[in-house]
Image (tube, grey):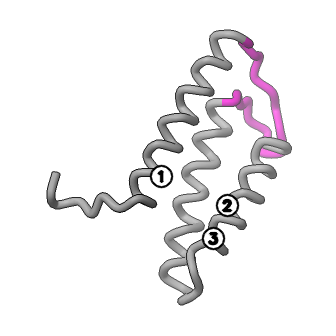
Amino acid sequence: MAWMAWTVPTALFFVFITALLAIFTVLAVKYPETPRIGMLRIETTRGDRLFITLLGSAFINLAWLGLTNVTQWGAVVICLIYAFAVFRWV
C-alpha cells in the first residue's frame, strides 16, 4: 500500500473510526434500543446517528479544506459540535 500516505494522523483517523464502530457494536448488543424520532421526523438508532455524524463530518472537513487556509483543527471543533447536536436532537 505504498500509494497511500500513511501518516500518523491518517492512521489515528482509521483507528478512531474502527474503535467507534467496535464500541457501537458492543453497545448495540449489550443495550438494545428502540428507534426514536427526532427533529428530522424519521426513526433513528445510535448507529443511524453515527452514520449521519460521520457523513456530515466528512462534508464539513471537505468544505473546510476547499474554502479556508486555516488549520484543520477548526473543522474538528465544528465536527464535535455537529456530532453533539446530531446525537442530542436527531
Which residue shows up at 53% across the image and 44% down it?
16
Where residue 1 appears, as percent x and y from the top left, is 16, 51
Q: Is residue 59 above or below residue 49?
A: below
Where residue 24 appears, as percent x and y from the top left, is 62, 26
Q: In the rendered structure, are the residues bearing label 3 and label 2 in contact, judged by CB atoms less than 8 Å apart?
A: yes
The residue tagged 3 is: 75
Few, some or many residues within 10 Å of mark 1 (<14, 14–19, 20+):
few
Q: Is residue 18 above or below residue 32?
A: below
Q: Nearer the viewer, mark 3 or mark 1?
A: 1
Q: Earlier in the sequence, mark 2 or mark 1?
A: 1
The residue tagged 1 is: 13
Which residue shows up at 84% across the image and 44% down it?
89
Which residue shows up at 75% across the image and 16% down it?
33
The residue tagged 2 is: 79
Q: What type is the residue that disc 1 sits on?
A: Phe
Q: What type is the residue that disc 2 sits on?
A: Cys
Few, some or many residues within 10 Å of mark 2 (<14, 14–19, 20+):
many
Q: Nearer the viewer, mark 2 or mark 1?
A: 1
Q: Is residue 50 above or below residue 62?
A: above
Magenta highlight: main SS: loop
